[in-house]
Image: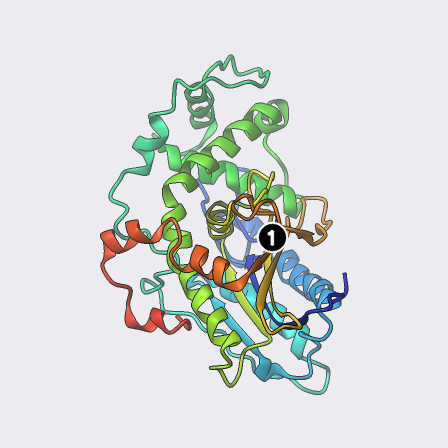
Amino acid sequence: MNEVNSDSLESVFVVHRHSIRAPTYFPAGDPYLNRDNYPRGAGYLTKKGVIACGSIANVWSSWYPEHIHGLDHTAVFVRSSESPRCHQTAQAILSALFSTQETIYPVPVYGPPPGFDNYISVVGYGKNINNVLRSHYQDSVSQPNTLGAVTFGDVIEAVKDVMTVPAPLEYEVFTFLDGIVSNMYEDHPIPDFWTRNERILTEVYEKLYALVIEQYRPYYGGHLLRGIAQRMKQVFNKELSSGTRWCDYSFHDFSLTAIYHALEGEINLPKPHFLAAIFFELRTANDGSHWVEVYHSHGIAPDGSYSPREPMRMRWNGGSHRVIFEKIFEKMYNNVYIDKLLGANGKKRNHEENGIF
């Protein structure tokens, strides 16, 4: 999709999930979630994930040829979460966009050291996530299965029975099922218990994700939305001398889901795929007014296809993806999470107030 709007497209902000990565959890002795299949390590990008970054970079540059054409790396700003897989994703995309056989252009990726990233910190959460998941054990499930399961808890306990670790916790069940999804992307073997009960296990995996993100949304979305909004304002006000035409935020599926919720996006995907993305187009109309158009892509499906870019219609905005900047700035800067976060953590660290960290 080319840039075809009578407005002047000033800048593009993209928030995306990292690329295909190894499972984050390898139960000891498990024959399917096997470290030998993922030599780069738990949670790190796989070779397929690195290659996917190059492919997606080409797709994005075809959508925005005037903004990421590889000729001016000073026009790019990149902020990664503290997670290595997010940093790796950002670097792989940048390499595809700005490196040639003759030259490698150094594009910095900003990111705080581990433990200092307020954009993904659950400090102040104060609950036990396993207790939260257990409180839903009696919820009914709808899909047929061979497990004899009629409740959410029945399925969780059935998964625990096939895990190779003693007394796994509920969140470990979630990360175990999440690891099986990584195996699907990598074409590694899938456990028989999954193939026999894929529909019910998918239902429970998606419910686990929904319950976890319901708890963690403020911690993955509140400060991130505020930081992005602040930088958007700086771009429109021409306060920045560099990094204004393409602003890339490489984060997690939790981060994208939190943004979908805060902006009331009409998104029907239960969980963002790898390299799912939200695009904020900053535009100046002929009368000088500032507007933002919001688009999204579901990312890479397990079959390797990449979702097209589509308008992200927002319920609070009457179902439109186009909004005057002042309104979306207010929606993002004073977002639905921020009061809870400031109440839990106090004032944000100064280095995050400037929109860089």
Q: Is residue 340 left or right of residue 25?
A: left
Q: In this orientation, which residue lies closer to the viewer: 125 or 350?
A: 350
**Would you name the residue on which mark 1 appears?**
276
Q: Is residue 44 left or right of residue 307?
A: left
Residue drawn at point x = 66 percent, y = 56 percent = 48
Q: Amino acid at mark 1?
A: Ala
Q: In this orientation, which residue lies closer to the viewer: 319 or 187?
A: 319
Whether residue 278 is visible to the viewer of this picture, yes or no, is yes
In which quadrant of the rendered view does residue 115 lie?
bottom left
Q: Position of residue 193 (x, y in %)?
A: 57, 25
Residue drawn at point x = 55 percent, y = 43 percent = 315
User: Is 280 placed above or below 23 here?
Assistant: below
Residue extending farthest to the front is: 287
Q: Position of residue 158 (x, y in %)?
A: 46, 22
Q: In this orientation, which residue lies closer to the viewer: 297 or 147?
A: 297
In which quadrant of the rendered view does residue 105 lie?
bottom right
SS at mark 1 in the image: loop
Residue drawn at point x = 67 percent, y = 74 percent = 67
Q: Quadrant of the N terminus?
A: bottom right
User: Is 199 placed above or below 182 here?
Assistant: above
Q: Is residue 353 left or right of residue 37?
A: left
Whether residue 30 is visible to the viewer of this picture, yes or no, is no
User: Is 113 placed above or below 29 here?
Assistant: below
Which class describes the residues within 10 Å of circle 1: few (<14), some (14-19), or many (20+)? many
Q: In this orientation, which residue lies closer to the viewer: 194 or 87?
A: 87
Residue drawn at point x = 33 percent, y = 54 percent = 338
Q: Position of residue 350 (x, y in %)?
A: 29, 72
Q: Position of residue 96 (x, y in %)?
A: 67, 72
